[in-house]
Amino acid sequence: MNKPLDERTIPSPESQGDLTLGQRLYLREAIKGMGVLASHFFKNLFGYRDPAPEILDRKGPGVNMVTTIQYPDERKPLPPGYRGMHRLVPRLDGTPRCVACYMCATACPAQCIYIEAGEYEDQAIEKYPVRFEIDELRCIVCGFCVEACPKDAIRMDTGTHAPAVLSRPLAVFDKQALMKGPAVEHPSDVLTYRMPLRTPVPKEPEGPGVTSKGLPLR
Amino acid sequence: MAVITPTARLASDDFGPVVAPKLEYSRWLIGTIVGWTAFVGFLFFMSWLFLALTRAIMWIGAQIPLDWGISQPLGTILSVVMLLVMVTATLLTMADRKWSALMQDRMGPNRARFSIIPFLRDKPLKGLPHIMADVLKMLFKEDFIPEGARENRFLFNLAPLLAFAPAFMLIAVVPVSPEINFWGARLQLQVARVDWGILYVFALASIAVFGTALAGWTSSNKLALLGGLRASAQLVSYEVTLGLTLVGALIVFGTLRLDVMAQLQGMGESAIRAAAMLANRSGDFFARDDSLLFGWLPAWGAVFQPVGIILFMVAGQAEIKRAPFDTPEGDSEIIGYFLEYSGLKSGMFLIAEYAETVVISGIVTAIFLGAYHIPWLEPTIARVTDGWLGASGVAWLAVVQVFAFVVKTLAIIWVLFVVRWAFPRFRYDQVMRLGWKMMLPVSLTNVALTGAIFLWAGRDGVAWMGIIEWIAFLFFVAFTQRGPAAAQGATGHTSTAAAH
């Protein structure tokens, strides 16, 4: 029994001569296996479920060992920097921050971004997108558009995925569909407002506006 | 905790929390206690209902001028076969999946909902709606008969019935309650109180072979035929062991009647009355249980026949063709003898399997686990409950005894399911080797030993033999050394190996 164990010398069913009767009967291992199942059964039956997915070894009083995340109802927190579906970031006045510079469309390796530019007559900001469409079926979620954008106008931080659609045209998201989330304002943005914004700035913006540095907006 | 970048913080802040809040411990505790109390209460209610339903049918039978003496069997059929076995078998289809999920750290099926009922719309209800969904699916599926089976349409259709019926007929001889006076009528929850009880079990267990063999044969499919062949070989082999394991019990109890066997494992009605009366007279709370062996050990069949109960459960598992003895089905290699069946016929094979599980567990309970008897406490319960709501203590005790029977049966079912999920499928030759070369000699030895000791030292001697066998079994399990293969595998796979 103290022979060095080599995987080439695993006893085959035919050569079980070196096993004792008890080992051949396999009763102990069989009952141990049933014991494992029984202990899991009772822990999971009487324990309460901890839905937090970070906890991989579920030890603790009364916690069961079910690690399932009930997906549509419960979701794993996405890792920071996770690239979800696109959104167009609004300005304080509700217009998109996008200045229709075509940087994202140029950077896009899948060529899924379509932009038609328009011009403001009375603004320091000269251009705006008349149409801004992203074909989420073509998108390969590389995030190059976010990197390319000079105005922090496109982000992929929605934490959602492109939804399932019943026909291809429905996966093309236009400007209205892409505009999500609270307004974002950078300190340098004020420099571009040589004339006041078309819409007056609301006194208290709804939702926590956050600057790109993560500081709350004053 | 990872560093939060502004974007990540934006996502979680703006688009809602991503993790469901953890359930409060107190709420969980209250829910658990309330749920289990409700479950036990439900079982008690059902136990009462079985008796009451039988009594009601008997009353109806008494109103009809032409009473053929079948009203009690009819009521028992209704309560035991239709309610106890049918409902339990139906619930087991879900319990099998849920329990296996619990054993493997999963959630189990929980997505089906009673979406038309307002209060239950968003409640998984422990997967119960899935039963409804399964039944509907089976009912509305196409009833397909393969080309080759068209000539044998009759046999092809007969096979599921032959698999289905014996399971329900077997419960006829299982005593679920003692014979008692319930609301002024003498009744017992046993459909057929016959002298040939165990022989009936053997006979009907053999009929189940026809169902599987016919199903495999008439399907005109080589995989189904293979499954049917394996099933018939396996069932015939294990019937031998099944029969021989019960012979030991026959020797000890000296009868073929299951109701008498059940009676002998605890106190009879008059003994309970006498013990309760004695306790009342002497003012004791606990009344003495006279049926205990040596004054402390319940006189259950399992005490006399350790080899009997273990081998019977193994052979029973083989009889109901569940893993590790599921070579006839072998879903991953040959789909099984029911390969060509669809719709409700396939469902009948499925339900028959679970009904057989219930019945085998019921027979194990009746013969080896004291049937409806509760050790130590029976006369005490009768004494305490005497006079509640105008019923005698023995009638109340009967309700508790039916409850005990159901609980014991559920426990055995659970053990069978643990076995089913713990072991991988045996190879066909292993099944045969286990049946003929190991279990048959052991059961024969058991019969010889039990008979010899019974002749030499009577029932107490057999009880001592049983105790020694149990202790030897425990020692054997506890002190077996690990084999080299097990020691190698133990490095990291001990817990995952069971997880199938």
Image (spheres, helix red, strand yellow):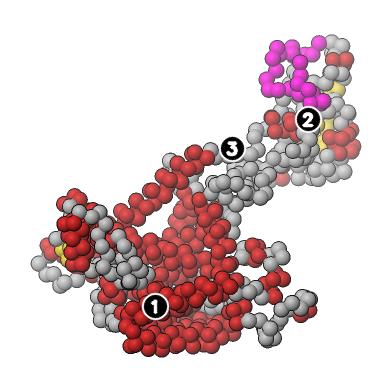
Task: Tell me if mark 3 has few (under 14), some (14-19) or many (20+) residues whose alpha carbon lies within 10 angstroms of its own.
Answer: few
Q: Quadrant of residue B429?
A: bottom right
Taking the image as shown, residue B291 lies to the left or right of residue B355, namely left
Whole-angstrom CA distance, mark 2 to mark 3, is 24 Å
Whether pointer 1 and pointer 2 mark residues with C-beta atoms closer than 8 Å, the reply is no
Q: List x then y, in percent, for residue A110.
A: 85, 44
Q: Which mark is residue B354?
A: none
Same-chain status of marks 1 and 2: yes
Taking the image as shown, residue B312 lies to the left or right of residue B255, namely right
Q: Which mark is residue B21?
A: 3
Q: Let me know if residue B123 is in the magenta part.
A: no
Q: Is residue B425 visible?
A: no
Whole-angstrom CA distance, mark 1 to mark 3, is 56 Å
Q: Quadrant of the N terminus of chain A?
A: bottom right
Whether pointer 2 and pointer 3 mark residues with C-beta atoms closer than 8 Å, the reply is no
In-front residue for pair A26/A53: A26
Q: Which residues are magenta?
A: A196-218
